[in-house]
Amino acid sequence: MECTVNWTGALGTRSGMGFVAETGSGHTLMMDGAPDTVKPENGGLNLAPRPLELLLAGTGGCSAYDVVLILKRGRHDVRGCTVKLEAERAPTDPKVFTSINMHFTVTGKNVPAAAVERAIAMSHDKYCSASVMLGKSAQITTSFAVVEG
């Protein structure tokens, strides 16, 4: 796996804190920093997600992918899956994630709660590389709801 990240500055200038990532699978995504009111030249322009937001989003995507795949392999009629992540960070640098809650909402027809609980546990404990890595510094908790539909 590879990825190249280039500093773009702000709108083609060499100020600002914008970056573009080019992934090994051929996709690009933008990142930007938060505006800095004390030293504007050190801040971003809020034009794209922060890098750590993308880390959190990637973890949610990784785990949701697992949950859907596990449920589908179990021949459950899953029709939707949403995961909302809420994270807390350490107050001092490097300000790692210290806790993350992942709340899954799985929509489907007659999907048993036990199957969803098992799929989430399997993702969290075995398959989701991102959550396993983040679990080294953050306490990760999960919860879920099953919606008929």
Image: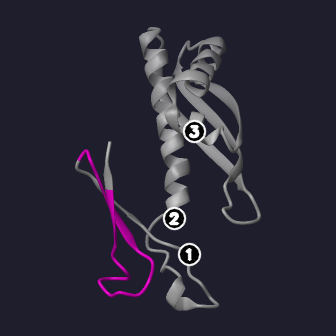
Q: Residue at x 43, y 21 (%)?
A: 69
The residues bearing labels 2 and 3 have C-alpha atoms spaced at a distance of 19 Å
Q: Amino acid at mark 2?
A: Arg
- The spot of residue 74 in percent (x, y) is 47, 9
137 vs 91: above or below:
above
Q: Quadrant of residue 25?
A: top left
Instruction: Identify the secondary structure beneath mark 3.
Output: helix
State the residue lying farthest toward the top: 75
Q: Which residues are magenta?
A: 4-25
Instruction: Identify the secondary structure beneath mark 2.
Output: loop
Q: Residues within 10 Å of mark 3 (few under 14, many from 20)?
A: few
Numbered label attached to residue 16: none
Q: Amino acid at mark 3?
A: Met
Q: Which residue is mark 1?
A: 34
Numbered label attached to residue 133: 3
Earlier residue among tags 2 and 3: 2
48 vs 123: above or below:
below
> Do the numbered discs 2 and 3 sit on residues whose CB atoms are within 8 Å?
no
- The spot of residue 80 in percent (x, y) is 48, 30
92 vs 56: above or below:
below
- The spot of residue 149 in percent (x, y) is 52, 24
Instruction: Using the rendered image of the protein, determine whether residue 64 is visible from the camera's viewpoint.
Output: yes
Instruction: Using the rendered image of the protein, determine whether residue 149 is visible from the camera's viewpoint.
Output: no
Q: Residue at x 60, y 27 (%)?
A: 124
Q: Residue at x 29, y 83 (%)?
A: 12
Which residue is nearer to you in this view: 135 or 57? 135
Q: Residues within 10 Å of mark 2 (few under 14, many from 20)?
A: some
Q: Quadrant of residue 11?
A: bottom left
Marks 3, 1: nearer the viewer:
3
Earlier residue among tags 2 and 1: 1
Q: Which residue is mark 2?
A: 50
